[in-house]
Amino acid sequence: MPDPFPGPDHRRAPLLDALRCYREADFAPFSTPGHKRGAGADPELRELLGSDALASDIPLGGGIDDSHFTGDTLGAAERLAAAAWGADRAFFLLNGSSAGNHAYLLAALNPGDEVVVARDIHKSLLVALILTGARPVYVAPRLHPTLDVGLGVAAADIAAALDAHPAARLVAVVSPSYCGVPSDLAAIARVAHERGVPLYVDEAWGPHFAFHPGLPPSAMASGADGAVVSTHKVLASLTQAAILQVRGDRIDPERVATTVGMANTTSPSVTILASIDACRRQMALFGHALLDRAIVLAEDARTRLRALPGVDVLGADRLGTDAYDRTKLVVDVHGLGMTGFQVERALRERFRVQPEMSDLAGVICLVSVADTTESIGRLVAAFAALADERRPPAEQGATPRSSGAVLTAGIPALSPRDAFFAPSRAVPLRDAAGEVSAELVIPYPPGIPILAPGDVVSAEAVAYLERGAAHGMYVSGAADPTLGTLRILA
Ligand SMILES: Cc1ncc(COP(=O)(O)O)c(C=O)c1O
């Protein structure tokens, strides 16, 4: 009989196997962590986590492996993950995709190097620019003409930036966006590679793409040289779990291994690592069927939510594109006469439904392999109750959903690193236009920087931030999170 699983045997889960062996061996631990399999833990912690979770909270070295890692259990699990996602090498990350962004850019760039970067980058890529001292050439994402949603960066814009900056050493883009919109990664890879430049994709929100043809093509399948995926975000691994993937040798994989070792903790949590291993097995064996169900449920929710008065939901049809992460429900609540912040509060407090995020225009809800007709029913029923109570919209022309309308392209006055370390002073936000920002200003979520260290502060950015602050937008990065003041270069 032919082997039903040719190639790598995805039924195996080396880290789970090793964890089980460790548990069964009943070692007397004279090693970290100090709670020693829960024996010394606070009783309430033990009650809430369960004694099994604490008993499985053991180190990699000196735990499932000896203290010199001679078993290479992690390596075996990473090789299976590389095969599942179509990469040459995979590195398990314990600080989310943030660690992957830091590690890849530290491997790919030297201080002072130019890097072509999509402007809708996440805070962690900006931190990577500060760490490396590289100089970004920002490329703005295209915007939908009416929806105020980013459409990803265009390959032609990347090509133009590379032609204007032939010394650039890397192209780095975020795809898909927080709203689920991918860039045309195959076209971007082509224009980058034609110029001898590697492509890195922050695919934090696309760990499931590799496992279903109804989702956008994954970064690895599109020819990217490196990509990071947050398996914890939409797949079933534990919070903080992510994978950095590399293909080819435009960037030396051994250098990436070194920088992953710098970005990761030296005390990796076996529970998080084992959850990545389990997630890989689940996706490799059953991903297609599980995602099929998630997509059907999400499309059903989209249809039923759109049928409610005052509610709209983004979709491939609204965007006029084929490629869209159909598991995302980006819900526009403007027609309910409420901000997204108010809707999130009502969903949480009155209906015990928790969206992923809210902004002025709406809320984003994630549908995953865990959802059922029942969970979708609760979500739709909660929105239906809010739609029944709707008021006329207070204000036409909602503030942009994302920061899209105020994202700037071009070259900052200073590199993020130089600006981060330069002397600075605080001024009232309204006086900051025309000055150089000393800090990151990131409305959260979605975590896209409106201002980065080194950017010239535009009048549009000031207006956007003033308006967001007035509506209770949560801002990360800025020294004054109320945005009464902004730090500018002295
Ligand atoms: C585009 C993007 N990249 C990276 C990250 C960081 O991911 P993690 O939270 O897994 O570190 C996020 C988090 O929201 C993100 O949205």
Image (tube, rainbow, N blue to C red):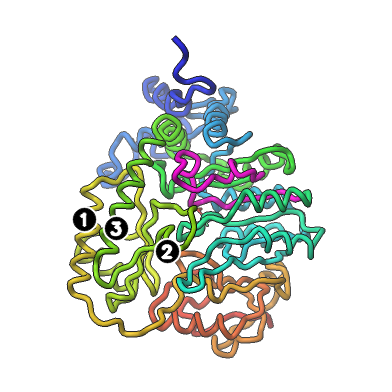
The three-letter code of the residue at mark 1 reads: Arg
Q: Which residue is the site of mark 2?
A: 318
Residue at (38%, 51%) from the top-left corner?
327
User: Could you say where residue 82 lies in the image, as x and y percent from the top left?
Assistant: 57, 34
Q: What segment is highlighted magenta in the picture? A: 197-225
- Location of the C terminus (image quadrant): bottom right
Inspect this view and state whether residue 61 appears: no
The three-letter code of the residue at mark 3 reads: Thr
The number of discs equals 3
User: Could you say where residue 229 lies in the image, as x and y percent from the top left?
Assistant: 52, 46
In terms of depth relative to the viewer, which is nearer, 30 or 379? 379
Asked if the stretch drawn in magenta spans residue 208, the answer is yes
Label 1 or label 2, whichever lies nearer to me, is 2
Q: Is residue 344 above or below residue 304?
A: below
Q: Is residue 414 left or right of residue 390?
A: right
Residue at (62%, 73%) from the top-left corner?
408
Q: Residue furthest bottom?
A: 431
> Secondary structure under badge 3?
helix
**How far is mark 3 from mark 2, CA to CA?**
13 Å
Q: Residue furthest top?
A: 1
Q: Which residue is the site of mark 1?
A: 378
**How far is mark 1 from mark 3, CA to CA?**
15 Å
In terms of depth relative to the viewer, which is nearer, 115 or 37? 115
**How far is mark 1 from mark 2, CA to CA?**
25 Å
Q: Residue furthest right?
A: 167
